[in-house]
Image (spheres, rainbow, N blue to C red):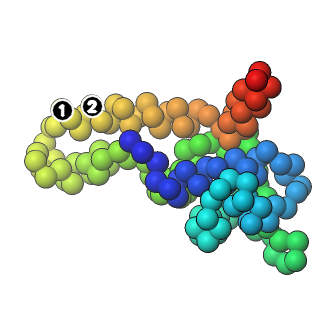
Amino acid sequence: MRFTKAEEYGLFGVYCLAQKNRSVVTPLSEISEEEGIPETFLSKIFQSLSKAGLVRSHRGVRGGFSLARDPSEITVIEVLEIIQGPYHLLKCTKDNEACQKYKGDFCALRELVRMAEQKLVSVFNDHTIADLVHWQEANTATR
């Protein structure tokens, strides 16, 4: 299992905003530079996040982005699903008919992947962007 670049960049972009005061408007160029993400790609990701109401877009000379909600209210799975849609490791875990081999009948591999998927989604659902910020701060403080 591997995050897409969009998922990875989206998480790092939201994480970057979460490290700042919510009243601060951060230019996209600053987020791009701090996180090492191509600005044009980040712009497309943030359009989706803005459309979904996760971040606020601020126009004008001092424009940029800010979080629309407290980081403790934003789960990791929410960010991922805004960017890529519902989280599934295999097409057939969402749609039995997508299976080429068993044509919708029972498949032991699909059941195993469903179990793994449920646990993975549970971890992403149980942790917020604020958790990531706190973990990073705790790790940085101990060095």
| Local SS, label 2 | helix
Cα separation between marks 1 and 2: 6 Å
Q: Position of residue 31 (x, y in %)?
A: 73, 58
Q: In the rendering, at what x and y percent does residue 115 appear?
A: 34, 31
Residue at 13% in and 42% down = 105
Q: Is residue 91 left or right of residue 128?
A: left
The quadrant the C terminus occupies is top right
Q: Which quadrant holds the N terminus?
A: top left
Toward the viewer: 118 or 43? Answer: 43
Name the residue: 70% across, 47% down.
Answer: 15
Q: Are marks 1 and 2 in contact (CB under 8 Å)?
A: yes
Q: Point out residue 113 in the picture as x, y percentages from the top left corner.
A: 30, 36
Amino acid type at circle 1 is Ala
The outermost residue toward the bottom is: 60
Query: Is residue 47 depicted above or below 72 in this figure?
Result: below
Residue furthest out toward the top = 142
* Residue 53 visible to an observer of this rendering: no
Per the rendering, the mark at residue 139 is none
**50 w.r.t. 117: above or below:** below
Residue annotated with mark 1: 108
Q: Amino acid at mark 2?
A: Leu
**On screen, 40 above or below 101?**
below
User: Is 85 situated above or below 40?
Assistant: above
| Image-quadrant location for residue 114 | top left
| Residue on which disc 2 sits | 112
Residue at coordinates 53% horizontally, 53% vertically from top-left?
Answer: 7
Q: Is residue 114 left or right of residue 80?
A: left
Which element is circle 1 on? helix
Locate residue 3, reporting x and y percent.
Answer: 46, 48
What is the crowding at mark 1: few (fewer than 14 residues within 10 Å), some, or many (at least 20)?
Answer: few
Disc 2 packing (10 Å; few <14; some 14–19; many ≥20) = few
Q: Residue at x 81, y 61 (%)?
A: 26
